[in-house]
Image (tube, coloured by chain):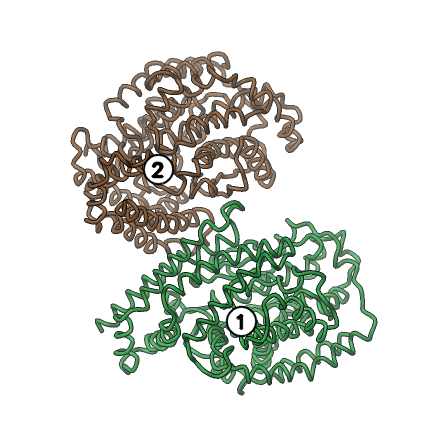
Chain colours: A green, B brown
Amino acid sequence: MEKLIRLKNILEESRMIGIASSRLMWDQSTEQPKLARGEYSNTLAYLQGKNHSLIINEEVKDIIDSLKDDDSLNPIDKAILRELKEDYDRIEKIPKEDYEEYARIRSLSILAWEEAKEKNDFKLFQPYLEKTIDYKKRFIQHLGIGGHPYNALLGDYEKDITVEDLDKFFNNLKDELIPVIKRIAEKENPTFDFEKKAYDIDKQKVFSRFISGYLGLDYQRAVLKESAHPITYGFSNKDVRITTHYYLNNFLSSIFTTAHETGHALYEQGISDEITFTIVGTGYSMAMHESQSRLYENILARNKNFWIPIYDKLQTLYWDNLKDVSLDDFYKCINKSKPSLIRIDADELTYPFHIIVRYEIEKLIFEDKVKISDLPEIWNEKLYEYLGIKPTGFSDGILQDIHFSQGYFGYFPCYALGNAYASQFAYGISKILNINECLLQGNISKINEYLRENIHKYGKLKTSKEFLKEISGEEFNPKYYIDYLKGKFSSLQ
Amino acid sequence: MEKLIRLKNILEESRMIGIASSRLMWDQSTEQPKLARGEYSNTLAYLQGKNHSLIINEEVKDIIDSLKDDDSLNPIDKAILRELKEDYDRIEKIPKEDYEEYARIRSLSILAWEEAKEKNDFKLFQPYLEKTIDYKKRFIQHLGIGGHPYNALLGDYEKDITVEDLDKFFNNLKDELIPVIKRIAEKENPTFDFEKKAYDIDKQKVFSRFISGYLGLDYQRAVLKESAHPITYGFSNKDVRITTHYYLNNFLSSIFTTAHETGHALYEQGISDEITFTIVGTGYSMAMHESQSRLYENILARNKNFWIPIYDKLQTLYWDNLKDVSLDDFYKCINKSKPSLIRIDADELTYPFHIIVRYEIEKLIFEDKVKISDLPEIWNEKLYEYLGIKPTGFSDGILQDIHFSQGYFGYFPCYALGNAYASQFAYGISKILNINECLLQGNISKINEYLRENIHKYGKLKTSKEFLKEISGEEFNPKYYIDYLKGKFSSLQ
């Protein structure tokens, strides 16, 4: 009992340092003045180092060992111990100096990436990428998990998924979807003049705020800002922050980016009060998180029925641009499929191939089969192989995503997994609720409630496997994702 | 040498924790969602406690003792040691538990104050105010400085000023200015219809941004946001953040609030690179800080010549409201003197009496001559005595300022001192530069440069006394302030 209290005090201290450090990162992405770039790298490294030494020490190790099999613990405490033990086993193996130095590099790396992307110059980023990868490789060595080296990285984002599982999943997608993409490519591409017109940024801000609220985001407990790469921070279920971005000639990007981050945010707002301040009080995994963002972005917000009650609002807001655009054309536009260069703007059908490119590159990196300087070219070749197009430079190729700069290797596959989970969850929900009916009635709260009660509130108290099983009645099965995409895109085109 | 390095490492650690804690406070004032109120009180208390124990311990004490008289130190290190020793002597006397508990109360107190102000209900705030005062009284006891108990509080904001000095200063103001205020009150008050018209908030934001930039704020190193009580945070000379507020029917408030905070921000942006990350790398004292904010707000931005080059810009922005308003009328309006309830909206002439009310109340509190529940009434009576008006409730009376909630007792007098310093500095500058000429030419950078080179860059390397002496040629002399006010307001009215 005394040990449990001591452990909770330590975890609370760690949570507070974590809050400080993630608040600084949030600030770095959304607000800090231009010339203050890099000024907080040391502070972040320091706080993260503090947190590391707070958790990784003999005392905590002993407490975990003595409590981990204690059957008298309540289910939440058991989950905390299980989670901690797993994290501990991973983190403990990494020396504190490596951890601190890695944090420092990471915080410089993001700045280098931003500049490299802005200047379309891979060379500016390459040394940071190389260092980041070196550290990741050292971490894999330290972890000593065995099997394919990439498996150790996957574990950070979705447990129990291996390179073997992913190879199978992605081959399945290639077999089933490449023919569909080819078939669409053979047809004439519909064009929608309204899409790339100028849309006032202030109005885009108003609509982003509206649509996130319409989807259920509670602004008494949320903040919406802007950043280069859209992101969600869940500080607690009462303080969830999202960003989006606004482009004058691409108003759809802000709408669907906002819907996407709203899905993440609803997950974090839905965590139950009992666990919100604990280490199990957050989304179960990156793949689970992505399942929620994709469910809101694609399955709901790209559904025609979603727009029926609100399309006139959008039309009125941008009357000059949209007065002659029918809902039907709008719907076709937001679901047109065409190979494109930027992952986050890709349509649902071609999206997984952006992931496959990244996955295959990351595998090559950690199999030591590639020189970092060759990556941009490999990227371009792979994209050409799957989607028949090539980036014009680095910024719309290998530099487009923040992930490499943050050392998030093993993260990308979770986006595709999240999409597949989302379809499987939607299949499960539709056994209870008529999703189209809810959307038509503007009654999204029913869907939100279902997800909150069956997924969100649990945080890490249940696993992806359990959620999938309970909601759909079966194990992970990509069939629902493939069926969803084939059904939607064959009826659309 | 080894000791100095060790000390610098400790100070750097303390700076980083300070950054984290003040970033959370900044966030609390400007951004956090409504329902997250109070969620970071413990984190702030924890970080502030950490910082306390980092500095207040035997090791640091020994280092300070062994270095404080070391003549081989360079001037910056000497100043750091001197500053640290002074802070140390004060803080060391306060037990860590008191310090932590006080920080926790303070962070709850600000929330209680916000709610009390919103609901116009002093009772909601009273218990927090009482606790805050209790802690302050304990701190005074711990400090054991002797003399009037209020002297110990003054020391936090301006050293070497005592109750005796302030009594003299304020009596001087009363003698000289009350007759002027009475004389103006006897005349008919000019009214300016345009003043309280509706001014679009988005346009106010645009103009705030413009005017702060026009005054010299470098937005590559600054952020402008909103908060209930306007404030400036200087994280370093490359990251200075200010807030203002916007009222639909009071556009002048946002203009002069922004000019005021810009003055503070220019001080912090002007700190030299050599000292920006050290404890001497910030404005010398609150009174010095206020001298800069008041110089920009009043002596520059309320000067007619300031508006001559830019009034058409303002007029064009708000054409419907200002098209028939002459610059002359605008100038008279921004300088009209009329007793009013809210300190931060008070005109220059009546302003010091808002301070005198607060000063006299604070003295009563710390002389133990008053019950906290009686304060609202005493406030109202004093305001009536000096300015002939009474608040309608608590929100426009005793609850109007954030200071009591933050335990900033002894702070208010520095506002009046700052005003007086500002006039004395302006007198000094005018021996070198023609201020009116600079304003007419829109050449404010000359004034900025003078202030940066003669005040800002030094941070805490020089004292108020030294700045006053070097710039004006004499000790602090309220004459310049009184002359400025009497001159301005007798020619205006």
Give how far across and how far down residue A102 sits, in percent. 44, 63
Give how far across and how far down residue A47 sits, in percent. 37, 57
Say which quarter of the image contains residue B332: top right
**Which quadrant is the C terminus of chain A positioned in?**
bottom right
Give how far across and how far down residue B374 sits, in percent. 26, 35
Look at label 2 and name its amino acid: Val
Inter-mark Cα distance, 2 to 1: 44 Å
Residue identified by numbered label 1: A411
Look at label 1 and name its amino acid: Tyr
Residue identified by numbered label 2: B280
Q: Secondary structure at mark 2?
A: loop
**Which quadrant is the N terminus of chain A positioned in?**
bottom left
Extreme-bottom residue of the structure: A474
Residue found 29% across the figure and 53% down from its top: B50
Above or below, A287 relative to B160: below
Extreme-right residue of the structure: A188
